[in-house]
Image: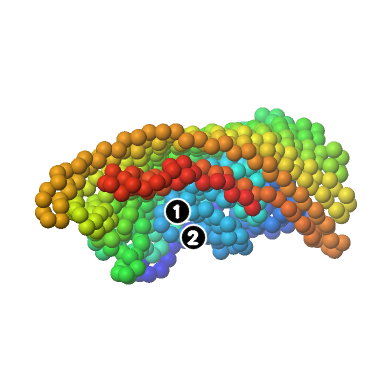
Amino acid sequence: MLSKKIIALVAVAVPTAQSFTVLADGGEHEMAPDSTKWLEEVSVTSIKQSPDIRLQSTSSTVLGQSRIERLNIRTLKGVSEIAPNFYMPDYGSRMTSSIYVRGIGARMDQPAVGLSVDNVPFLNKDAYDFDLPDISRMEVIRGPQSTLYGRNTMAGQINIYTLSPLDYQGTRIMGEAGKGESIRLAASQYALLRENLGMGIAGYFNFRGGYYTNRYHGYKADKEKGGSLRWKTAWRPTERLSVDNTMSFTLDRNGGYPYEYLAGNEINYNDTCFYRRNILSDGLTLKWRGDSWTLSSITSVQYIDDNMTLDQDFLPLSYFTLTQRRHETNLTQDIVARGNAGDRYSWLGGLFAFYKHSSMHAPVTFKEHGIQRLIVDNVNRNPIFNVTWNDDQFVLGSDFRIPVYGLAAYHQSDLNLGRWTLSAGVRLDYEHVALRYHSHVSTAYTMTMKNGRPMGSKEINIDQSDRLKEHFLEFLPKVNVCYRLPIPGESDVYASVAKGYKTGGYNTQMFSDVLQQQLMSEMGRPVEYDINEILSYRPERS
């Protein structure tokens, strides 16, 4: 029966005295009559948004802690069932974390939707798919958000905030088991070390035995295990200064990809498939509160080490395999100032800088069926000679280094005219991206005339390196007009015009095509191509 139905679901919270408490069943304590009914979703940690994002002239969905736990939302994929116009498909591995908002998304490379956790931005979409223990609030903002959040937010922005030990103290334990040998365990402890200093530590583990069997080997193709550890510190040394730091480590091990070959209607491939990912990140937020202004500094560092290895044909035959091993370091610095002049005018401005460096080793290995059917059979259509390959397999080797850095300045003003609110913002965004590549192939083939006379062997040795670079400068304005309706409650009508931006760059996955073209040129079938034209892609705008 363990494989047929969920057998256990336990969530325990043991908090200290609070005005709002999450219970095991996801319910809430009754609150005093004069309490704000939206207390669970009002932000006191958001730096770029107002305390309650729903009162802004933007299309958004806000999920509080109790709703996240009640609906058993485990990852961002679960938000697809709640947030309108938001979709994150559930297939492949944790690397396949494409997100679509209003139909706009990206399958690879730069995302079209931004993500930040505790105000710290995630620059790589391959790190978007992770589990969500102890989340206090999530905001899904739809439409272009490039003015405040910058690059790669042309479709929207997702903000996630975790529990603060200054707001919540106690022990939380969660356990779950279900079909597919699915197990999830989480435990966390939040405590005050002093009245103004709190720390919290949260651990998480998940295991899934899988649902789909690879018939070639007889094991589950979608087996998965992983875990995370998060340490959060919140300190208020004075009434004006706050210091928050979140350090986390995430480990994921995916068994592979449960992809069927359409003609065979079964999962049946012979070569190894897996995805492994380690992420270490740390974010430090400093906030100083003046009488009518605040100044915040958000500093982050993130390191990603991952390896995707694929049987790229997904057949029980040996065509070709792909490995993509990557090491990436991301550094970001955001300085945000905001204030107001009376009740009518408020403003926000900031400076943002980032540096991202990726090194990647991405060989494509051609094997016997791939060599024969994709290369030899095509060449042997020549009426003069035949070709046989000397090697059972050979490697199209590609190594990359991709340094990227950017600078941005932004500002937004809001004018309150009674029931009318007028907002305008602008951002100037500069980015530099470079690609240093090294490609190499070493193999050989033998030529024979159609009459059987040997023509000898020919070696193929390709070894080339080069550097490509691009610069992007973008102007990103937005204008909002909002009218608060003269009816009870917070209801309004608004119009918003904003420019969204998804940066350009280089698609390294196209480099195997470049090497194949060079290989064919070495065999007497020259093809004209431009490496920069094949690899680069231009910015996109919405």
Q: Is mark 2 on a helix, strand or loop?
A: loop
What residue is pinned by disc 1? 96
Q: Name the residue under label 2.
A: 89
**Neighbours of disc 1 within 10 Å: few (<14), some (14-19), many (20+):** some
Q: What residue type is labelled 2?
A: Pro
Q: Do the residues labelled 2 and 1 touch (CB within 8 Å)?
A: yes
- The x, y position of residue 412, in whole percent, is 75, 42
- Crowding at dot 2, Cα within 10 Å, few <14 / some 14-19 / many 20+, comes out as some
Element type at mark 1? loop
Q: Can residue 126 be seen in this view?
A: yes
Amino acid type shown at disc 1 = Thr
**Camera-nearest residue between 53 and 215:** 215
- The residue positioned 79% from the left and 42% from the top of the image is 413
Mark carried by residue 24: none
Residue placed most toward the observer, 112 or 245: 112
Distance from disc 2 to disc 1, alpha carbons, whole Å, reads 9 Å
Residue 365: x and y in percent read: 28, 47
State the colouring used for the structure image.
Answer: rainbow
Observer-nearest of 147 and 160? 147
Residue 61 position by quadrant: bottom right
Q: Residue at x 47, y 35 (%)?
A: 468
**Residue 83 visible in the current orientation:** no
Q: Residue 46, relative to residue 2: is it above or below? A: above
Q: In this view, does 457 lie to the left or right of 39?
A: left
Quarter in which the N terminus is drawn: bottom left
Residue occupying image coordinates x 43% and y 42%: 531
Q: In this view, does 214 lie to the left or right of 243?
A: left
Q: Is residue 163 left or right of residue 443?
A: right
From the top left corner, tell me how far across and down residue 182 is, in percent.
39, 59
